[in-house]
């Protein structure tokens, strides 16, 4: 049985598909905000586009991972995986 120090650190990103990884969230948000400014050439519309996108990015990059780690769900899943492998 593995000790606590031998276990891989728990990452909520291991449970998400490729299109919901930090790099894809950042790339999508930045592309949409930049695209809005580039194509519409209007700062106030870009700000209206940026506000919900930045909220979405902030939630999925900062809040959601912390909630998953604090909930303990990932540790339970990792423990059951270790027991299954032993």
Image (tube, helix red, strand yellow):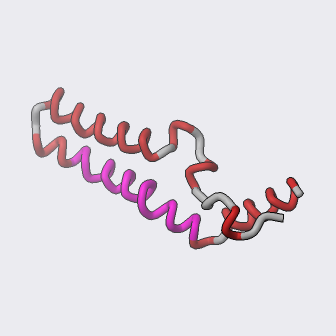
Which residue is depicted at the point 12% across and 45% down? 44
Magenta stretch prevailing secondary structure: helix
As drawn, is 61 to the left or to the right of 34? right
Which residue is depicted at the point 36% across and 43% down? 26
Specify the farthest residue to the top: 39
Q: Quadrant of residue 82?
A: bottom right
Count of marks, rendered view: 0
Q: Position of residue 13 (x, y in %)?
A: 56, 51
Decide: is 21 above or below 7: above
**Magenta residues (range):** 48-69
Q: Quadrant of residue 5?
A: bottom right
Quadrant (top left/top right/bottom left/bottom right) for the N terminus: bottom right
Decide: is 4 above or below 65: below
Taking depth in this image into account, of 45 and 10 the one nearest to the observer is 10
Which residue is depicted at the point 25% across and 39% down? 33
Quadrant (top left/top right/bottom left/bottom right) for the C terminus: bottom right
Q: Position of residue 38 (x, y in %)?
A: 16, 29
Quick check: is 66 in the magenta stretch?
Answer: yes
Which residue is depicted at the point 36% across and 38% down? 27
As drawn, is 72 to the left or to the right of 46? right
């Amino acid at each position: 049985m593995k000790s606590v120090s031998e276990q891989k650190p728990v990452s909520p990103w291991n449970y998400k598909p490729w299109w919901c990884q930090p790099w894809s969230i950042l790339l999508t948000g930045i592309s949409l905000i930049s695209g809005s400014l580039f194509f519409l050439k209007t700062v106030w519309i870009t700000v209206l586009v940026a506000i919900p996108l930045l909220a979405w990015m902030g939630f999925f990059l900062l809040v959601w991972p912390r909630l998953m780690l604090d909930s303990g769900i990932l540790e339970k899943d990792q423990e059951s995986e270790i027991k299954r492998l032993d």
